[in-house]
Amino acid sequence: MKAAVFHKMKDIQVETIDDPRIEDARDCILRVTSTAICGSDLHIYNGMVPQTRDMVMGHEFMGIVEEVGSGVKNLKKGDRVVVPFPISCGTCHYCNMQLPTHCENSNPDNYGPEGEVPMMKGVGAALFGYTDIYGGYNGGQAEYVRVPYADYGPRKIHDNLTDEQVLFLTDIFPTGWAAIDWAQLKGGETVVVWGCGPVGIMAMKSAWLQGAKRVIGVDIQPYRLEMARKSANAEVINYAEVDAVQVIRDMTGGYGADVCVDAVGMEADRTVLEKAMNVVQAEKGTMKVLEKCMDAVRRSGTVSVVGVYGSPYDNFPLYKWFDKGLTLRGGQAWVHRYIDHLISLVEGGKVKLDDIITHTVPLSEASRMYDIFNKKEDNCLKVVLKP
Ligand code: NAD
Ligand code: ZN
Ligand code: ZN
């Protein structure tokens, strides 16, 4: 089959590899019909999450069941499904607590307390196509993919919905939803989302659905701010032009937002900001978006972190968390917990997910699209690959 294979930093090539096989009675093999590139894939592409062995990329995919293992009861050949990006068994201590991203069974080598090699021990559930740290499973940017625990993850989708309408149920919609759910809105809140990438925009859509009265998006790329305005009806702030923390305070009577979401993560672009804002040396230590969220949120507010922080070493501003009495939540999104409700929102026409797609191309163009998406060229916001 053809697959987008990661070789080394900035080197992903579409090539022919062996088809996946059923390896466990609970597996199924999926023929992939649509798969997306995620901002999380860029952490691997840019070497922020290391991988030393060839691996098929991709954790946002859907398709048609081709074959099922002998232990699979809920699926049969021909079923059309979307697949959550975390690989979870559905039966362990944490899966039973509806905490699928902490599954104890899918990533046994790296699960548990942090070991001697930082980054190589102490993570949770496995993820599709997300390096040996996260279980070493091949991903779905391919013609076929092996899906473990096939009775637990995949969800069947009605034929009257297109791939594009439901593909983002695999990751970015549940992730945006989680960011807001973690803040437990009561209704009427002001929510600021840092990062108007696919995840940030899904968090904005989720904020409206969960009762926010005001939704504000922050980014440094004008075309992405424009998408947040159009697709998620957000007010927007260009952080490359103004001090976003000050503007948010001014917009909220001096108090700050009730909720700040960090949908940027560890690769916050300092170069663009430093150039644009002529940032002085003394400010350089505080460019991290997480810390800006803590500055821009009101006292006793919530900071919700879905942008990935993967470095084992961090200079975290504990004093700001303590002094402002903040609630801080974060992590990989509990896709399995939310997905059935979110499917019903899509089916009921309560939310539109496909309006953020800017590029739909054959899988064979994956290499070029990684480059474009990474460089944020060609107004690229979300890429869908068709195997
Ligand atoms: P993306 O790279 O397309 O978007 C990131 C956005 O942040 C870009 O629009 C960029 O211009 C903006 N940005 C960069 N520096 C900034 C700054 N200093 N201030 C404001 N905005 C800035 O990625 P994405 O697909 O939207 O994903 C966003 C993050 O969410 C990534 O870290 C990704 O790994 C993570 N993610 C987490 C989960 C989860 O389960 N927690 C799931 C999916 C993605
Ligand atoms: Zn993703
Ligand atoms: Zn489990």
Image (spheres, rainbow, N blue to C red):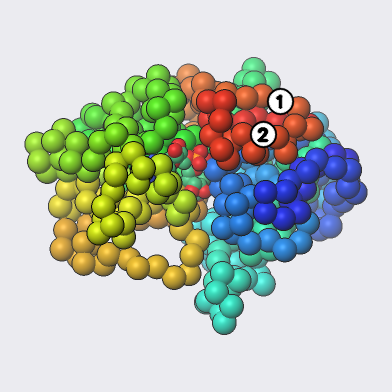
Q: Tell me which residue sits at (62%, 24%) in the image.
A: 359
Q: Tell me which residue sits at (65%, 39%) in the image.
A: 370
Q: Is residue 303 above or below residue 35?
A: below
Residue 214, image quadrant? top left
In what quadrant of the picture does the C terminus appear? top right
Q: Earlier along the polypeptide chain: callout 1 or callout 2? A: 1
Q: Secondary structure at mark 2?
A: helix
Q: Amino acid at mark 2?
A: Met
Q: Residues within 10 Å of mark 1 (few under 14, many from 20)?
A: some
Q: Position of residue 197 (x, y in %)?
A: 46, 36
Q: Which residue is mark 1?
A: 361
Horizontal arrangement in the rendering, residue 154 relative to residue 31 (left or right): left
Horizontal arrangement in the rendering, residue 357 relative to residue 197 (left or right): right
Query: Could one spot residue 186 in this view of the protein?
Result: no
Q: Which residue is mark 2?
A: 369
Q: Position of residue 205 (x, y in %)?
A: 39, 30
Q: Residues within 10 Å of mark 2 (few under 14, many from 20)?
A: many
Horizontal arrangement in the rendering, residue 317 relative to residue 127 (left or right): left
Q: Which of pointers 1 and 2 indicates the residue nearer the eye?
A: 2
Confirm if mark 2 falls within 8 A of ligand 1.
no
Q: Are marks 1 and 2 in contact (CB under 8 Å)?
A: yes
Q: Amino acid at mark 1?
A: Val
In what quadrant of the picture does the N terminus appear? top right
Q: Tell me which residue sits at (58%, 40%) in the image.
A: 374
Nearest the eye: 232 or 376? 376
Q: How many marks?
A: 2
